[in-house]
Image (cartoon, rainbow, N blue to C red):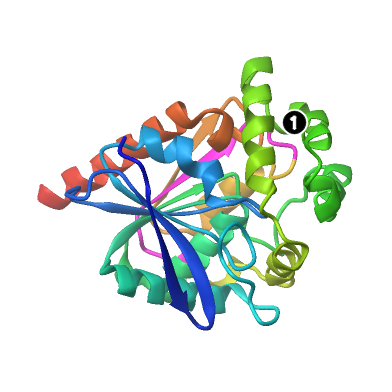
Amino acid sequence: MARPQFLTITANDVDFRVALCGPQRATDTLVCFNGVGLALEALLPLAKELHKHRVVLIDAPGIGGSSEAHGPYRLSHLSASVAKVLDELGFDRTHLFGVSWGGALAQQFAYQYPERCVSLVLAATSSGLLSITGNLGLFAQFTSPKKLLNLSFLSKISPELTTAGRAAVSTHSILFGAAMKSLRPKGYVYQLMAMTGWTSWPWLPKIKTPTLILLGKKDPLMPPTNGRIICGRMQNARLDVLPYGHLFVYTQPFETARKIDEFLSSIQAAAVA
């Protein structure tokens, strides 16, 4: 894969760092929303495996290379900012991918801008407020930005978040730690606040976009029941369960990309049929 092209695009008073990956002449574009606190570098291995597609990665406000928001924001406000970023890039209709926190943002964007969404892929995520809570003790660990900046702490909790084997866990810890180094406490706290009271439950049935929901069978943070709830509420969604924990997108980029590729190919085939 060619080296990513990094850009800074201003929308609603935030300077968003954006990475464009993959072939410029690709026929489709996939916009990816990351997990909480993670800079876009954490998704570069996945983008590398999605080499057939143009992939757009965006740092959330106050995360990675994006400037901080001037105050707390809602996911609806961030979705509007993302729409402006995509306008600036010249992308009208795209595929969407979101993992964990980014899955909530992807749901919000698909609801606000259905005309802009070709398809939707949700990984290790939930419908928000009306969801099934996972391991509360593990959840509590993620409320401390200081802990998440500690690589030894990340190495310690990695086995609880993934079942991908020691090599993958080690690789994840290094990658996760590198992405977390650019985390700023205010940006991280604003991400957590954006989820306060948020739920997609009432309007999930209104999303008609073809959707793939990827679940980790052994996910301790977002139990697979959450994906089944989302699927049951949507009109055009299907499930795929992987034998991993919460972080399979990062520890298993090849397998995750294969699932996404197969889904996007089915969407393209249906469009020309």
As rendered, which of 150 and 156 lies closer to the eye?
A: 150
Q: Residue furthest top?
A: 166
Task: Answer above or below: position of 181 versus 186.
Answer: above
Mark 1 residue type: Ser
Task: Answer above or below: position of 232 versus 200.
Answer: above
- Res. 218 in view: no
SS for dot 1: helix
- Res. 6 in view: yes
- The residue lying at 69 percent from left, 36 percent from top is 219
Q: Residues within 10 Å of mark 1 (few under 14, many from 20)?
A: many
Residue 153's spot in the image, x, y percent? 83, 36
Give the magenta range: 205-220
- The residue lying at 85 percent from left, 52 percent from top is 146
Q: Which residue is mark 1?
A: 158
Quadrant (top left, top right, bottom left, bottom right) of the N terminus: top left
- The residue lying at 28 percent from left, 44 percent from top is 53
Residue 227's spot in the image, x, y percent? 58, 47
| Residue 246 highlighted magenta (yes or no) | no
- The residue lying at 54 percent from left, 63 percent from top is 105
